[in-house]
Image (spheres, rainbow, N blue to C red):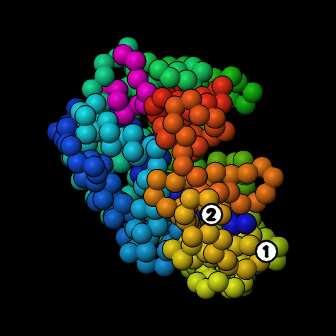
């Protein structure tokens, strides 16, 4: 079984509606999300070969090129999150903030640190039309600096103004947008809640200088491009270092040079590889992957095609980009065997174990498919 390859992409919950800039909406297009999705994803895939985005080396290696990256990303586009957002844009409940889309693309192209945080243009691509206090299904529907809140995470939620710095919070989603800073809910060990805090982003540090990550509220000091922050977990501060050369000793969280990862079993930096043919050797734990664009999945140490995507064929529910199920189907997992089955998502009231089992993308607490998409905080 292959590992899931996560990507902080367009469908991440960090993207939220806010602001009152020039907006576009009300389109009847079946792809109402394209004016935001296309330029942002194109810039993002191009940036993987220029920027040191944390945690995204796997995508760059698996894709192999910006064009293949875009093909992989588009495989994840037909999600309930996106489908519902397109409907909301088409009927005017949500608008795309065109100036923020342009600013987001520029920030990505410039490899600006923390480009995908809530306080950046990339974190505010949409504006809702629902006023504070209105019932909501998702944050993008809410106007201004508000989010869709539901204490039990069930719908409907309520459009709620985000908390100002110094106010009490349970998650960072509750904290209001900041300028040149990251809004974060900072809590003490063992505490049940925290305080909304604006974390300033300071100038990047040079080789050998002090750097910081964030969880305790101290200012963020990223490293200069090409360097990484070497810190002892769970400490938030460390030292900027150059990536470790291939073949040199490393520890689990160390950053290796080029397209290499720290192979923990050997304690050495080694190149990652992608198998492009059925039968090629694979081992996700050793960073030997299979080509998702060829619908290959790692099975018992070999890349295999496990299904043709048709209704009833086998699929791998643990892979984000293999996309072995045809459009309109999803990979339904089984508890008693490693692979799932390509199936039709259920309508309202159908039995479900996860949101992916449902056309709406939401599975209620009673184990049945909800009527509509539900994603409050």
Asked whether 323 or 150 is in front, the reply is 323
Find residue 356 and report its horizontal and vertical position in percent: 57, 45
Residue 132, visible in the rendered structure: yes
Residue name at image x 28 percent, y 39 percent? 89
What residue do we see at 82% from left, 77% from top? 266
Estimate how packed mark 1 is, as few (under 14), some (14 to 19) or many (20 or more) residues with alpha carbons within 10 Å.
few
Which residue in the protein does label 1 denote? Answer: 300
174 left or right, relative to 352? left
* Res 79 label: none
What residue did someone put label 2 on?
313
Question: Residue 284's spot in the image, x, y percent?
Answer: 71, 71
> Tag 1's secondary structure?
loop
Element assignment for label 2 = loop
Q: Which residue is found at the position 38% from the left and 75% from the top?
A: 67
Question: Extreme top residue here?
Answer: 133
Toward which corner of the image does residue 2 lie, by quadrant?
bottom right
Spot occupied by residue 157 in the image (x, y as percentages of width and height): 47, 20
Percent from the top left, x then y, of residue 166? 49, 22
Which image quarter is the N terminus in?
Answer: bottom right
Magenta segment: does it hold 138?
yes
Boundaries of the magenta span: 134-143
Q: Within 10 angstroms of label 2, few (less than 14), some, or many (20 or more) residues?
A: some
> How far apart are labels 1 and 2 at the CA level?
19 Å
Foreground residue among 76 and 178: 76
* Residue 180 drawn above or below residue 210: above
Left or right side of 154 for 32: left
The image shows a total of numbered marks equal to 2
Asked which quadrant contains residue 331, the reply is: bottom right
């Amino acid at each position: 079984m292959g590992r899931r390859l996560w990507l902080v992409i367009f469908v991440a919950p960090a993207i939220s509606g806010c602001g009152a800039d020039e907006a576009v909406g009300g389109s009847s297009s079946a792809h109402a999300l394209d004016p935001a999705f296309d330029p942002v994803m194109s810039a993002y895939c191009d940036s993987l070969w220029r920027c040191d985005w944390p945690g995204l080396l796997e995508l760059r290696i698996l894709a192999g090129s910006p064009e293949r990256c875009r093909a992989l990303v588009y495989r994840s586009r037909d999600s309930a999150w996106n489908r519902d957002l397109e409907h909301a844009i088409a009927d005017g409940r949500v608008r795309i903030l065109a100036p923020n889309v342009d600013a987001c693309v520029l920030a990505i192209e410039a490899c600006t640190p923390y480009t995908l945080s809530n306080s950046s243009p990339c974190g505010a691509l949409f504006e809702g039309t629902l006023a504070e206090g209105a019932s909501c299904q998702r944050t993008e529907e809410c106007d201004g600096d508000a989010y869709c809140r539901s204490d039990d995470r069930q719908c409907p939620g309520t459009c709620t103004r985000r908390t100002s710095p110094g106010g009490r919070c349970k998650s960072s989603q509750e904290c209001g947008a900041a300028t040149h800073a990251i809004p974060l809910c900072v809590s003490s060990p063992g505490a049940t809640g925290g305080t909304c805090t604006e974390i300033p982003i300071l100038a990047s540090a040079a080789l050998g200088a002090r750097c910081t990550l964030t969880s305790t509220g101290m200012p963020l000091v990223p490293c200069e491009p090409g360097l990484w922050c070497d810190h002892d977990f769970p400490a938030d501060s460390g030292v900027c270092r150059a990536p470790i050369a291939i073949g040199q000793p490393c520890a689990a969280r160390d950053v290796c040079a080029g397209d290499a990862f720290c192979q923990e079993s050997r304690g050495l930096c080694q190149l990652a590889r992608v198998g492009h043919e059925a039968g090629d050797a694979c081992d996700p734990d050793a960073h030997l992957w299979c080509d998702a664009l060829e619908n290959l999945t790692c099975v018992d140490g070999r890349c295999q095609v496990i299904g043709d995507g048709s209704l009833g064929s086998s699929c791998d529910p643990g892979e984000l980009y293999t996309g072995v199920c045809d459009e309109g189907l999803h990979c339904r997992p089984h508890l008693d065997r490693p692979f799932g089955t390509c199936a039709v998502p259920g309508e309202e009231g159908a039995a479900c174990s996860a949101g992916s089992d449902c056309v709406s993308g939401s599975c209620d607490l009673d184990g049945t498919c909800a009527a509509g998409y539900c994603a409050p905080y």
